[in-house]
């Protein structure tokens, strides 16, 4: 059975309740451990986290694929670049 409809991400990181800039640092560290081309889904709080983390990741060279508003948080999908 194909489970890609559940989550297309290769890994998930729940950073709800994690303040800035720690959530960005944890996201970046997790991405650095992943293989190039893989997709990480990060759960972030509304407000400063969802406003700051995607911009910081983009400036660090990561590709934001999708930001989805969910029940009380945001799911950010970010791709590890293929060099």
Image (cartoon, helix red, strand yellow):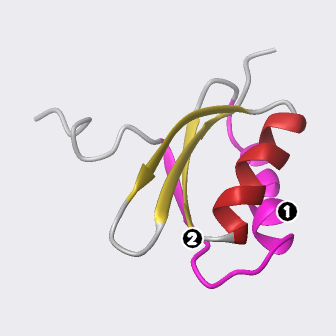
For label 1, the SS is: helix
Seen from the viewer's position, the closer of residues 32 and 49 is 49
- Mark 1 and mark 2: span between their CA atoms? 18 Å
Whether pointer 1 and pointer 2 mark residues with C-beta atoms closer than 8 Å, the reply is: no
First in residue order: circle 1 vs circle 2: 1
Report the residue at 76% width, 80% height from top: 19
The residue tagged 2 is 46
Is residue 33 within the magenta segment? yes
Residue 19 inside the magenta-drawn segment = yes
Q: Is residue 9 visible?
A: yes
Magenta residues (range)? 10-35
Position of 15 relative to 83 (above/below)? below
The one of 59 and 36 positioned closer to us in this rendering: 59
In this rendered view, identify the residue nearer to me: 62 or 35: 62
Q: Position of residue 23 (x, y in %)?
A: 75, 69
Instruction: Residue 25: give its label.
Output: 1
Residue projecting furthest to the top: 83
The vertical placement of 55 against 22, above or below, is above
Residue at 79% in and 36% down: 58
Q: Position of residue 26 (x, y in %)?
A: 78, 65
């Amino acid at each position: 059975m194909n489970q890609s409809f559940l989550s297309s991400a290769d890994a998930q990181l729940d950073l709800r309740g994690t303040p800035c800039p720690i959530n960005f640092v944890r996201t970046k560290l997790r991405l650095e451990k992943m293989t190039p081309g893989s997709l990480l889904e990060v759960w972030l709080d509304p407000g400063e986290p969802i406003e700051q983390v995607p911009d910081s990741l983009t400036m660090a060279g990561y590709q934001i694929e999708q930001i989805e508003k969910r029940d009380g948080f945001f799911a950010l999908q970010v791709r590890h670049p293929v060099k």
